[in-house]
């Protein structure tokens, strides 16, 4: 279940909430992801700084290559970093362009989604 939430959150981060709704209504093959997405509560973007200050801990940082991000967005995109955080049974995922991951202001970019 947590893997489904993380993948759904990643899709929403990259494509936006409207794309999730569209993907649930346009293809019969999307029936299984549609059922999983229907179980996901409304997702709101938050800053990583807010998550860390509320007690979340970074559990993993995953490199996402340009090939993968470009396929997800269907246009040329950058390498990315996917950051997974956890606080008790709650999790959050953040996705940043790799070039943004190494700048001081990255904690203030609203590209994180919290799943409770």
Image (cartoon, rainbow, N blue to C red):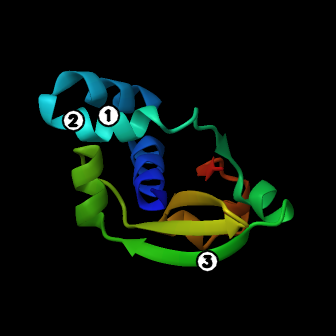
Question: Which residue is nearer to you in this view: 13 or 104?
Answer: 13
Say which of 17 and 6 sits in front: 6
Badge 2 or badge 3: first in the primary sequence: 2
- Determine the image quadrant of residue 92: bottom right
Marker disc for residue 30: 2
**Circle 2 SS class:** helix
Find the distance from the CA under tag 1 to the CA under tag 2: 6 Å
Q: Can you say which quadrant of the picture contains the N terminus?
A: bottom left
Real-space CA distance between mark 2 and mark 3, rounded to the nearest whole angstrom: 30 Å
Q: Percent x, y for residue 51?
A: 76, 58
Q: Mark 1 and 3 residues: CB-CB less than 8 Å, in contact?
A: no
Identified at 42% across, 47% down, the residue is 8
Q: What residue does disc 1 label?
A: 34
For label 1, the crowd category at 10 Å Cα-Cα, with few meaning under 14, some 14 to 19 and many 20 or more, is some
In depth, the one of 73 and 7 nearer the eye is: 7
| Picture coordinates of residue 12, whole percent (x, y) | 44, 41
Instruction: State the mark number for residue 59.
Output: 3
Please tell me whether residue 66 is drawn above or below residue 27 in the rendered image.
below
Q: Total marks drawn? A: 3
Mark 2 and mark 3 in contact? Answer it, CB < 8 Å.
no
Side of 100 relative to 62 (left or right): right
Discs 1, 2 touching: Cβ within 8 Å: yes
The residue depicted at 75 percent of the width and 66 percent of the height is 56
Question: Mark 2 or 3, which is nearer the eye?
Answer: 2
Residue 62, given in percent of the width and then of the height, sits at 45, 75
């Amino acid at each position: 279940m947590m893997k489904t939430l993380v993948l759904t959150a990643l899709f929403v981060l990259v494509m936006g909430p409207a794309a999730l709704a569209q993907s649930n209504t346009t293809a019969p093959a999307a029936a299984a992801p549609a059922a999983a997405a229907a179980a996901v509560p409304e997702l709101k973007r938050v800053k990583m700084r807010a998550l860390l200050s509320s007690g979340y801990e970074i559990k993993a940082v995953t490199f996402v290559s340009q090939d993968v991000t470009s396929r997800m967005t269907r246009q040329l995109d950058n390498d990315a970093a996917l950051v997974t955080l956890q606080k008790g049974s709650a999790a959050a995922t953040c996705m940043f362009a790799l070039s943004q991951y190494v700048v001081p202001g990255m904690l203030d970019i609203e590209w994180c989604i919290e799943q409770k």
